[in-house]
């Protein structure tokens, strides 16, 4: 049994001494459900720190509803079943009012039955495969139409890509995303023989054969592009193998969906320069809001080398939307907050706003970035805010579905039969 790690961030009397209005009443508890150990800790620890920074900042403003916020941190340790156990602990033992957490889709899906049973509220901050809308989740990361589809459009229109290698780590997010992209490419006239799909396990290291297969796609003279849903340290070997084969980003551009500033900060970027990534935020975005966020992050961590990234922005947006919804509802009650949050608008870090939609997704701009030698990105494309689509238009069984929690009370509404398929999520 892994021991629970808890961090209770209450506002002390000393911190309150200089404030005009003291906070009163019981603390509002914020659950933080991110891996602090195991393979995902390198990514998720940063999001834990982001929540703690937001709690500290909100307490400095007087808390919420005049009450202090208290963060309760647990460590699900990159163990997917343990995510469910820790979520249950947060809701039943710690009695948190809201949770911020999960990274991989398998961890989120492990938590879904728990929060739906106990009527908890989870803010999920990472890009994912879509095909889901839970009553008890606010999805603040990108759906496929806010990352994958626009990225492919960019590669078609700006880079002239005609043959496609869809390379992913073997789990639900890459497989579902690539199923959507395969259907999308074919709907745009791409022949089946011009699409190569391959999955590898976490930590895969031998890329020579796969890179050779990718190169072979261009034997007929067509421009080849890679769409990468490769996760974790397997990326290091993949990019090194491309470079060893003498392939530059001009020859075969790689568009990554899971490589950002945090992942690049610990890597030699020599082999990555010029390749691309699609996100909804980059640290290099130019806005007053982003400058202030970066400054606050460096002050909170005490480390000016700590980078910011897309899931951090999604965490910040979710936190601020929750605060706004609680203040609008006048309570932390989950049902009231869920009703109040749809339509809430909060600033993003690229100079616009994010709106919470009836399907529990957000509006988000789509950014394409080119990797620089310093591990940052040159933003080469940015769209207006795109509404997140819970159910893709490019899979027949999903194209007829929509989610509308305030209107129809349903996350799987069939527009043809005018009926709710089911309330409970697909786990």
Image (cartoon, rainbow, N blue to C red):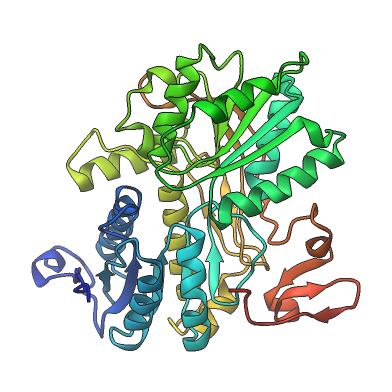
- Indicate the quadrant where residue 205 lies: top left
Determine the residue positioned at 62% across, 52% down: 175
Determine the residue positioned at 67% across, 46% down: 178
Q: Is residue 135 left or right of residue 269?
A: right
Q: Nearer the viewer, residue 18 or 116?
A: 116
Residue 253, horizontal then vertical, whole percent: 60, 22
Q: Nearer the viewer, residue 180 or 157?
A: 180
Determine the residue positioned at 22% across, 34% down: 304
- The image shows residue 211, relative to residue 363, as above or below, that is above
Q: Is residue 239 left or right of residue 37?
A: right
User: What residue occupies the far right of the structure in this picture?
Assistant: 416
User: Which quadrant holds the C terminus?
Assistant: bottom right
Residue 112, horizontal then vertical, whole percent: 51, 75
- Indicate the quadrant where residue 101 lies: bottom left
- The image shows residue 300, relative to residue 54, as above or below, that is above
- The image shows residue 134, relative to residue 35, as above or below, that is below
Residue 262, horizontal then vertical, whole percent: 36, 39
Q: Is residue 383 left or right of residue 78?
A: right
Residue 250, horizontal then vertical, whole percent: 59, 13
Whether residue 7 appears in this view of the structure is yes
């Amino acid at each position: 049994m892994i021991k629970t790690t808890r961090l209770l961030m209450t506002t002390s009397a000393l911190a309150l001494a200089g404030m005009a209005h003291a906070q009163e009443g019981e603390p509002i508890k914020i659950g933080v459900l991110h891996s602090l150990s195991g393979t995902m800790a390198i990514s998720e620890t940063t999001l834990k720190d982001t929540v703690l920074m937001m709690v500290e900042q909100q307490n400095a403003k007087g808390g919420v509803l005049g009450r202090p916020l208290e963060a309760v941190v647990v460590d699900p340790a990159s163990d997917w079943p343990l995510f469910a156990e820790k979520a249950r602990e947060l809701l039943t033992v710690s009695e948190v009012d809201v949770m911020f957490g999960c990274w991989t889709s398998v961890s989120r899906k492990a938590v879904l039955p728990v929060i739906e049973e106990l009527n908890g509220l989870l803010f999920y901050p990472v890009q994912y495969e879509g095909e889901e809308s839970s009553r008890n989740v606010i999805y603040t990361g990108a759906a496929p139409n806010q990352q994958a589809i626009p990225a492919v459009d960019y590669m078609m229109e700006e880079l002239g890509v005609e043959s496609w290698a869809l390379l992913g780590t073997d789990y639900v997010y890459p497989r579902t995303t690539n199923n959507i992209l395969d259907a999308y490419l074919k709907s745009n006239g791409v022949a089946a023989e011009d699409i190569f799909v391959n999955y590898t396990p976490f930590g895969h290291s031998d890329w020579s054969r796969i890179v050779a297969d990718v190169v072979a796609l261009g034997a007929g003279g067509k421009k080849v592009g890679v769409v990468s849903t490769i996760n974790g340290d397997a990326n290091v070997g993949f990019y090194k193998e491309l470079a060893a084969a003498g392939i530059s980003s001009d020859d075969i551009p790689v568009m990554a969906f899971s490589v950002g500033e945090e992942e690049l900060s610990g890597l030699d970027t020599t082999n990555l320069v010029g390749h691309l990534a699609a996100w909804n935020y980059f640290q290099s975005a130019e806005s007053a809001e982003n400058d202030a966020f970066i400054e606050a992050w460096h002050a909170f961590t005490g480390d000016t080398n700590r980078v910011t990234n897309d899931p951090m922005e999604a965490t910040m947006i979710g936190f601020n939307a929750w605060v706004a919804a609680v203040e609008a509802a006048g309570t932390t009650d989950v049902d009231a907050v869920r009703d109040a949050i749809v339509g809430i608008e909060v600033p993003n870090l690229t100079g616009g706003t994010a709106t919470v939609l009836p399907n529990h997704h957000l509006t988000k701009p789509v950014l394409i970035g080119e990797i620089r030698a310093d591990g940052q990105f040159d933003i080469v494309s940015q769209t207006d805010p795109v509404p997140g689509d819970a159910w893709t238009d490019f899979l027949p069984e999903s194209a007829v579905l929509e989610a509308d929690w305030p209107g129809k009370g349903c996350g799987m509404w069939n527009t043809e039969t005018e009926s709710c398929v089911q309330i409970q999520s697909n786990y």
